[in-house]
Image (spheres, helix red, strand yellow):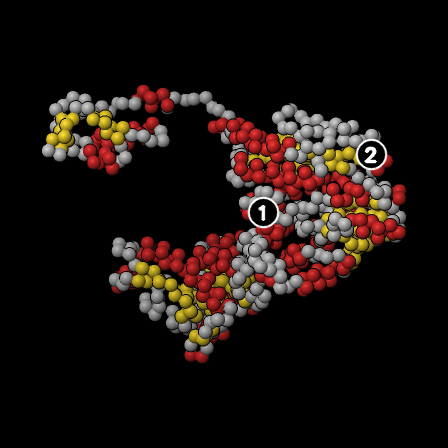
Amino acid sequence: QMTGLPKAKELGLEVFHAGTALKDGKVVTSGGRVLTVTAIKEDLMTALQEANKGVAAIHFKGAIYRKDIGYRAIAFLRQSRGLTYKNSGVDIAAGNTLVQKIKPLAAATSRSGCNAELGGFAGLFDLKAAGYRDPILVSGTDGVGTKLKIAQVCKKHDTIGQDLVAMCVNDILAQGAEPLFFLDYFACGKLDVEVAQGVIAGIAEACKKAGCALLGGETAEMPGMYPPGEYDLAGFAVGAVERGQMLPQLERIADGDVVIGVASSGVHSNGYSLVRKIVEKSSFDFSSPVGASGDQTLGDLLLTPTKLYSKTLLPVLRSGHVKAYAHITGGGLLENIPRVLPESFGVVLDALTWKIPEIFCWLHKEGNLSEDEMTRTFNCGIGAVLVVQKEMALQVLKDIQKHETAWLIGKVVSLQKGSANVKVHNLLRALQANRSLSVHSHIQGKIQTNKVKVAVLISGTGTNLEALINSTKKPSSFAQIVLVVSNKAGVEGLRKAERAGIPTRVIDHKLYESRTEFDSAVDKVLQEFSVELICLAGFMRILSGPFVKKWEGKILNIHPSLLPSFKGANAHKLVLQAGVRVTGCTVHFVAEEVDAGAIIFQEAVPVKIGDTVETLSERVKEAEHRAFPAALQLVASGAVQVGEAGKIYW
């Protein structure tokens, strides 16, 4: 009689019979090679191991089996093999797949002068076929900068291509050039065909909008150069202008000429290292809703693509009425306008003459930026400027306004020795005016005003601190952590606070002779930061009576049990000894008696059979990470407060 066949089936194995019979419902054999056990797995080694498990599970009288099956094949597989490009990290097949997917995208950008067919060693452009008689070639190159980081975090890759094209073609417009063709460079550590296709589709679409052909490009897969999920972009635009139509026309620029500003779509593609730092230190993240209806995130807003000006402004630039054009790119208003002016001239602008997009108002306020920092880093709502003769200004403005929002924003002036090339008057007033006009819409409408200032006191790793930081960063939070205080230097909680941009202080209790003196030092720092609420997150000191009395109803603590049961230290041990079925955590106001203050919030945690102090502690800690932020939100919002005799009021 044979046993163990069901076990082999449980293991997912196939057993082939030869020389067995079914007798009285049982499998029997009279000997010989009667069974073959077969396993199918992802590799030979695993399959062999699984098959051997099945063989070992089957028993009958006189059964023997071989243990050397497959050894030659395994020995072969273990031999050293030559390396390939693919196992070095470069997938040529994936690159070829990408080329096939983007070929039709590039072909759709064909224009007079070229057919935009990919696959050759180089692209060709016929200037004569494009209608040029005596052309000067103009080239420009640029990237997208750290705006890419936001696109990658938000996993939104379809608009970043327009930023790349716009940064290049808007630059060559400064020479009066029409963009003719574009080349892109896409670099990554590991090629994700879908992501790369999305980026290049955006580039191709932008090329069509700009009127230039996507003539070629390079996809570089470079293992080890970029972390997973990251990529970099560079672009190269070539345009042409007839010899007599080149800009700027420096010799024509004169005192009194008018400056026309053309609206930007937002931040465009400059200053994003500063933008990211401001967001990091704010109560927002890139997923925060910012629209009046909440249907747009901060990430979406910051990824608004750079405007393409070539098709709308090129006819105006060729009219003969424009003396200079400047693309307001890296360096902002202060550094780009002088690039198209004679050294003896500057401009005076009035920021009250144009509409500053609210994103700039928010960046200015949230980052506490100076006026100089704003105008040297950002376009402040002006994506391009044109210099025209005063008498022609209104006509040129009217022509631009057929396609773009534009304003008369200033004038050209003769420079006095030592004076600034660009002066922007009334910027602060304009930023404040635009902010106050839309305080209930867009970004400002989602910010909780007058957030309660919170200090967190810690002594160690700060796991509850981390939960509080994450919750208070949300726009809906009524609290803001303004300070983290530790009685021990060098603890992980301090590093977590610093990474979140929160000020920290170390007040070593060993340096003070009494609890009262130590608490007095803590109180002084709390006053310095105008703290309104205190959270004790693993703070291993008992606070003195005078301190608790002063901050009555303003100190929150979390305890790892359902108070009033199991007060004091060793709560988990006491819970297990008592044999209760449910424990949890409690957030309460601090009173002079330990763990006796009014309860704000509790979350229950079941006690499981076989729980140890360690396993129970782990689950209760997870509950604490939910309960503490919830309790802080209740108190900070004013929904809960403590009154006389420790009574809670809702």
- In-front residue for pair 183/108: 108
Q: Residues within 10 Å of mark 2 (few under 14, many from 20)?
A: some
Q: In this figure, what is the number of numbered marks?
A: 2
Q: Which quarter of the rendering shows the C terminus?
A: bottom left
Q: Can see residue 372?
A: yes
On screen, residue 646 above or below 624: below
- In-front residue for pair 299/206: 206
Using the rendered view, name the quadrant where residue 216 is placed: top right
Q: Residue at x 78, y 56 (%)?
A: 424
Q: Which quarter of the rendering shows the N terminus?
A: top left
Q: Residue at x 80, y 35 (%)?
A: 241
Q: Is residue 480 left or right of residue 116?
A: left
List the residue tagged with mark 1: 150
Eye-nearest disc, 1 or 2 = 2
On screen, residue 88 above or below 479: above
Residue 374 coordinates in the image, percent (x, y):
70, 54
- In-front residue for pair 613/403: 403
Marks 1 and 2: CB-CB under 8 Å?
Answer: no
On screen, residue 446 above or below 414: below
